[in-house]
Image: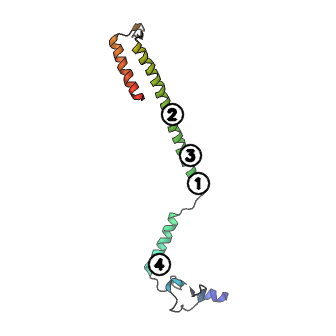
Amino acid sequence: MSSNVALAQYIWLNEKGVKQYSDTPPPRSVPRDKIIKTPFGNPRGQDKNAAQSNDANKSTEGKLEKPVTTASKNEDFNKRKIAREEADKKADSERQNAENKTKNCERAKSYKQSLDEGLLIMTRDKNGERSPIDEAQRSKEMADVKKILSECN
């Protein structure tokens, strides 16, 4: 039997699904899709264009599925790690900004309360001398504080 297999130029599946080996073509009753091998490399009745399209599909499939290597796994891991670190940095930055905004709002509320109560508020001039603010400066400071507080809510 092994010598027959070695000389076989045609291979097809019979009606029971068993492989048949022969050096003569299969009977005409065998459907084209059951012919596995012919001496010409493609099953009998299959045209060259179909064979070429099958080859093209096989080459495309090979290109789409690249083998997973340790290097590609490492590269994917590093990409995920960098993305995670960037997300953590962004989250920390947003948290810090929120804390700073909260502190600034608290300071602005306290300063507004001091302005509303009419407390004596001192400033320093170019020479470092202390002087109290006048009503014009007080109203300007009040406008600035209200603007800051409007952004707090």
Label 3–label 4 contact, CB within 8 A = no
The residue to which callout 1 is attached is: 73
- In the current view of this chain or complex, which residue is farthest to the front? 117
Residue type for callout 4? Ala
**Label 4: element kind:** helix
Residue positioned 50% across, 67% down in the render: 61
User: Residue 33 has which mark?
Assistant: none
Q: CA distance from mark 3 to mark 4?
A: 45 Å
Question: Of the residues under marks 3 and 1, which one precedes in the sequence?
Answer: 1
Question: Of the residues under marks 2 and 1, which one precedes in the sequence?
Answer: 1
Observer-side mark, 3 or 2, equals 2
The residue to which callout 3 is attached is: 81
The percent position of residue 111, horizontal first and vertical second, equals: 43, 17
Question: Of the residues under marks 3 and 2, which one precedes in the sequence?
Answer: 3
Residue type for callout 3? Lys
The residue to which callout 4 is attached is: 51
Q: CA distance from mark 3 to mark 2?
A: 21 Å
Which quadrant holds residue 10?
bottom right
The residue to which callout 2 is attached is: 95
Residue positioned 48% across, 25% down in the render: 103
The percent position of residue 125, horizontal first and vertical second, equals: 39, 10
Residue positioned 58% across, 54% down in the render: 73
The percent position of residue 21, horizontal first and vertical second, equals: 60, 88
Residue type for callout 1? Lys
**Whether residue 96 is situated above or below residue 26 in the rendered picture:** above
Disc 3: CA contacts within 10 A as few (<14), some (14-19) or many (>=20): few
**Label 2: element kind:** helix
Front one among 60 and 41: 60
